[in-house]
Amino acid sequence: NTSFGYNSFGNIGDGNSARNVAIGALSMAVNTTGTENTAIGSTSLTANLTGNSNVAVGSGALGGNDADFNTGVGTLGLSQVADGVKNTSLGANSGTVIISGNFNTIIGADANTLSDLSNTIAVGGSTKVGCNNCAVYGDSTTGINSGFGTNHPTAKIHVVASDTNVIRTSL
């Protein structure tokens, strides 16, 4: 284990934790048996007792986490996750609603789920996804154009099947 910062990795526990990195005040402060975690930023992974294989980069990232295989990058990224697994967030304040949800991918500052959901994808600043097994691209107030097979989409969904077949749909 490697730590640097005030009370980082403050609780060595029973010596069963291994291969952890804690950099920043109170990062991994209560870890006891969690292994292979990386916490960079003050209070990142601060509540982690037994969670394994997590990556937290940013102040407060994964601050409430005690689960496995979560990645939070950005200030307060996935800060409320307690026991949800295999969640990924990138962006300040992203994924802060998820507590027990699993398999979520949240990308963009302030992007989130509307409740504690699983199997979601939210991409774009302030984007919110509101149902399990759903993907949302872009904030509903501004919307975005999505292109498949084109680098310049001109509709909400713009699919180019080949040079002669173009499908454009506005929803």
Image: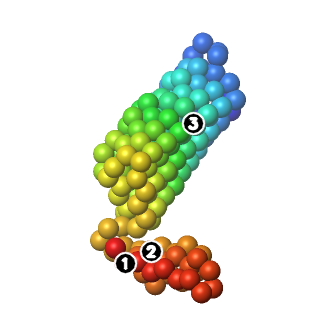
Residue beneath the point at 61% across and 34% down: 53
Q: Is residue 134 left or right of residue 152?
A: left
Residue positioned most to the bottom: 164
Residue beneath the point at 51% across and 24% down: 49
Residue beneath the point at 34% across and 73% down: 171
From the top left corner, tell me how far across and down residue 64 is, in percent.
42, 35
| Nearer to me, 59 or 126 | 126
Which residue position is annotated with label 3? 69
**Disc 2 to disc 1, C-alpha distance:** 6 Å
| Nearer to me, 115 or 36 | 115
Where disc 2 sits, the SS reads: strand
Label pair 2/1, CB-CB below 8 angstroms: yes
Label pair 2/3, CB-CB below 8 angstroms: no
Which of the labelled discs sits on residue 92, or is there none? none
> Is residue 109 in view from this perspective?
no
| Nearer to me, 146 or 3 | 146
**Crowdedness near tag 2: few (<14), some (14–19) or many (≥20) residues, C-alpha within 10 Å:** some
User: Which one is in front in this view, the residue at disc 1 or the one at disc 3?
Assistant: 1
From the top left corner, tell me how far across and down residue 6 is, in percent.
54, 35
Which of the labelled discs sits on residue 170, or is there none? 1
Residue type marked 1: Ser
Which mark sits nearer the N-terminus, 2 or 1? 2
Which residue position is annotated with label 2? 157
Residue beneath the point at 58% across and 20% down: 33
Residue type marked 2: Ile
